[in-house]
Every structure is written in C-alpha cells, then in structure tokens.
Image (tube, rainbow, N blue to C red):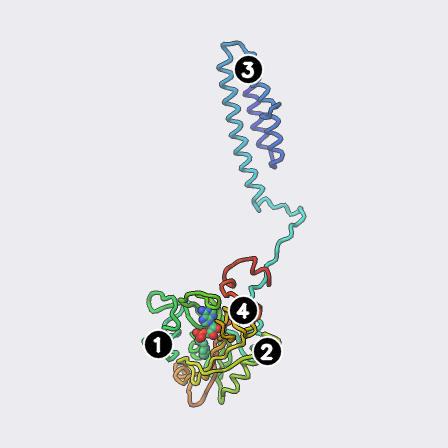
C-alpha cells in the first residue's frame, strides 16, 4: 500500500505538470482527491490494514494528501495568473469589444476655439506651466509689491518659480522669440490658490490671445472676440464690455457673457448676477512691448485671457466647474 500511495503521488504530479487550463485542473483534483477520488479510495482502505501497519501507512497517506493539496493550490495560482496574463494572448480567439474613449469637453471646446483663430491667421503655441516669477508677473508690469499679485495667489516653488497663474506668462516669451508682427493664441492649464466653489477651481484652463502689429486698435480686439464667440456658440450671445484693471493692458476691459445656465435670471454659477466674467482683455501695455523687445512707438497690440473652462461650462450648461477635473466617468461619458 505504501508503494501504491507513492506511485499515485508521482502520477498526480506528472498529470498536473501537463495541465493547460483551470477547468482541466479542477477535473484532475476531483479525479484524485474528490469524494470518489483515487487517493480518497486508498485512504479508506487504511482501516483494513493490520494494526501494526495502520499508524505508519495512515500517516504517510495523510502526508501525501496534504502535499498534493498544496501542489494543486500552487498549480491553480499559476494557471489563473497565466489565464489573466496578456502574455497568454491567443490571436485566434474572436476579439472582445473595447470601450472607446473620447475627447474631454475642455479639449473639444479648445479645438473649436483654435480652429476659429487659425482661420483668422493666428498660430497656436504652448509654454511652461512651471514658470518663473519674472514671466508670470514682473515683465507684465507687475513688480514685487503690486496688489495684482494677491488676486492671483498661486502655488509657489523654490527659487522664484511658481505654477503659472495665467497664460499671460507667454506674452513676453512669445514677443522675445518671434518679435513683431505677431498673431498667436496659447491655450493651457493654469493654477490658483483658490477656495473652490461652483465657478472657481484651483486648476483650470485659459486661452490667451496676443496680436501685435502696426495700427492695432480696440475695434480689432472687439471684432476678434465676437468672431470667437459666434464660432463657439453658433449663435449670437449677449456680451457686455466694462472697464477692467490688469497691469499689463491699457486700457483694460472685462468681457462678460450673459449666463447661459440660468439665461440671466441668477444662479450659483453667476453668483445671482446673470453675468459671468469670461474674457478680460485690453490693449498691450507699452512696458510689456518693451519687455518683449518691441518698440511701442512703432507697434501696438491687443491681448485677451479667455476663461476656457468657464466657456466650456456655458457651452454645455455645466453648473459646477469641479465636475470637469473630477475624473468622474459618469460625468465624462455624457460628451
Ligand atoms: C487673467 O488671468 C489675465 N491674465 C487675463 C488677461 C489676459 C487680461 C490678457 C488682459 C489681457 P483673470 O484672473 O480675471 O485674468 O482670469 C481670466 C479668466 O479666467 C476669468 O475671466 C475667468 O473666466 C477665468 N478664471 C479665473 N479664475 C478662475 C478660477 N479659479 N476657476 C475657473 N476659471 C477662472
């Protein structure tokens, strides 16, 4: 009987080494260790042995059973791992349908705006999100102690660096690099140290525009803003222009849009005012042109800083800005 047990053990181990899938392995386990299995049968026979043999053979039989249980458990782990592994990819099996992703709503609107500006002869540029204090503030006529810095508190890094609080950081960079005449937009992510609410995020998107050439005036600025809005909304939207202060433009304006979430009747997004600040803009300050190496006596220009994330909210009637960066697929799948 001892011989029989050892032979059976070797046979089981050999069979296990040939197993290719978990179904086959489960069948094998039943065959040997199941209620009517071969090893179970042998174990039952132990009671018929002579008294002096019973303890020794019984002990051996139990040891073999435990050993085989461990071998089966190990084999199950390996086979399951293989079945889950892409290395075991069988190219002859029919394919599984994968769920296709799509563009984020902010990217959809960004591309639409880019298209509208490309048609007006603007190029699209990108730039650093980790920025120096100089390009984010100082060269924009916003020295160290200027109160404007406090309205744009951001995340400060070591060595005079910060996470840019505005895409305006690219104004002087672009003028330095390309000179005048210049016509470009710079969409991108910006950061603010903000208490968040329905219309304020700490991380959001702006789209800056800059045009510098001879004889550029406010009329050019307003016409460009209008062209942009009708391209995005495919209809006339109500806007208003009011004076606004930004150290790097003179004169400066705020362009507000009639809130499309509540049609102007007042809601948490527009803070019950019916209007939403969308696009500050103005004529480029001579000091900024000079910082970029452009002669303000020869050239003039306009700049604007569209709140791209707010535009997305208006376009899709999203009543809480925090949904956009939440990564919540239930929200994102709707676009
Ligand atoms: C600026 O950032 C200026 N750089 C804009 C500018 C550019 C003015 C060029 C003149 C010339 P402001 O801080 O207002 O300005 O932000 C611009 C727009 O970004 C706002 O109108 C708003 O639409 C959006 N915005 C501002 N803060 C937030 C926020 N916390 N969350 C979401 N959108 C915001």
Disc with the residue nearer the chain's start (2 vs 3): 3
Cβ–Cβ under 8 Å for marks 4 and 2: no
Disc 2: CA contacts within 10 A as few (<14), some (14-19) or many (>=20):
few
Under circle 3, the secondary element is: helix
* Quadrant in the picture for residue 145: bottom left
Q: Which mark is residue 147?
A: 1
Residue wearing tag 4 = 313
* Above or below for 298 versus 174: below
The answer to whether residue 170 is seen in the rendering is no
Query: Where ligand 1 lies, by image quadrant?
Result: bottom left
* Above or below for 298 versus 209: below
Q: Residue at point 61% right, 46% down?
A: 89
Instruction: State the CA–CA distance, disc 4 to disc 2.
Output: 16 Å
Residue wearing tag 2 = 230
Disc with the residue nearer the chain's start (4 vs 2): 2
Instruction: Between residue 155 and residue 277, name the one nearer to us.
Output: 277
Q: Which mark is residue 121?
A: none
Residue wearing tag 3 = 46
Disc with the residue nearer the chain's start (4 vs 1): 1
Under circle 4, the secondary element is: helix
Residue that protrudes farthest toward the left in the picture: 145
Asked whether mark 4 lies closer than 8 Å to ligand 1, one says no
Instruction: Between residue 291 and residue 269, name the one nearer to us.
Output: 269
Disc with the residue nearer the chain's start (1 vs 3): 3
Residue 164: % across, % down: 41, 70
Q: Nearer the viewer, mark 2 or mark 3?
A: 2
Residue 107: % across, % down: 55, 67
Q: Is residue 210 left or right of residue 38?
A: left
Asked whether mark 2 lies closer than 8 Å to ligand 1, one says no
Quadrant of the frame with the N terminus: top right
Quadrant of the frame with the C terminus: bottom right
């Amino acid at each position: 009987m001892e011989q029989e047990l050892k032979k059976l053990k070797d046979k089981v181990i050999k069979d296990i080494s040939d197993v290719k899938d978990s179904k086959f392995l489960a069948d094998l386990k039943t065959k040997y260790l199941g209620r009517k299995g071969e090893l179970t049968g042998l174990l039952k026979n132990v009671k018929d042995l002579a008294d002096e043999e019973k303890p020794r053979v019984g002990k051996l039989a139990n040891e073999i059973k435990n050993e085989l249980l461990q071998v089966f458990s190990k084999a199950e782990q390996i086979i399951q791992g293989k079945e889950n592994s892409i290395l075991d990819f069988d190219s002859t099996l029919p394919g599984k349908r994968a769920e296709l992703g799509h563009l984020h709503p902010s990217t959809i609107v960004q591309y639409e705006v880019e298209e509208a500006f490309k048609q007006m002869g603007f190029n699209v540029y990108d730039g650093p999100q980790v920025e120096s204090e100089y390009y984010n503030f100082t060269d924009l006529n916003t020295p160290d102690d200027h109160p404007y810095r406090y309205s744009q508190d951001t995340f400060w890094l070591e060595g005079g660096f910060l996470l840019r609080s505005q895409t305006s950081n690219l104004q002087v960079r672009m003028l330095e690099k390309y000179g005048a005449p210049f016509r470009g937009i710079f969409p991108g992510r910006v950061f603010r140290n903000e208490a968040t609410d329905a219309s304020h995020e700490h991380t959001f998107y702006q789209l800056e525009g800059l045009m510098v050439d001879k004889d550029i005036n406010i009329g050019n600025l307003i016409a460009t803003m209008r062209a942009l809005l009708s391209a995005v909304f495919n209809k006339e939207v109500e806007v208003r222009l009011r004076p606004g202060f930004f150290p790097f433009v003179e004169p400066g304006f705020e362009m507000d849009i009639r809130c499309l979430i509540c049609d102007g009747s007042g809601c948490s997004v527009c803070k019950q005012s019916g209007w939403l600040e969308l696009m500050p803009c103005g004529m480029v300050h001579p000091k900024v042109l000079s910082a970029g190496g452009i002669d303000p006596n020869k050239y003039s220009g306009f700049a604007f800083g569209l709140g791209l994330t707010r535009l997305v909210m208006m376009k899709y009637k999203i009543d809480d800005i925090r949904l956009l960066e939440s990564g919540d697929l239930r929200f994102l799948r709707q676009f």
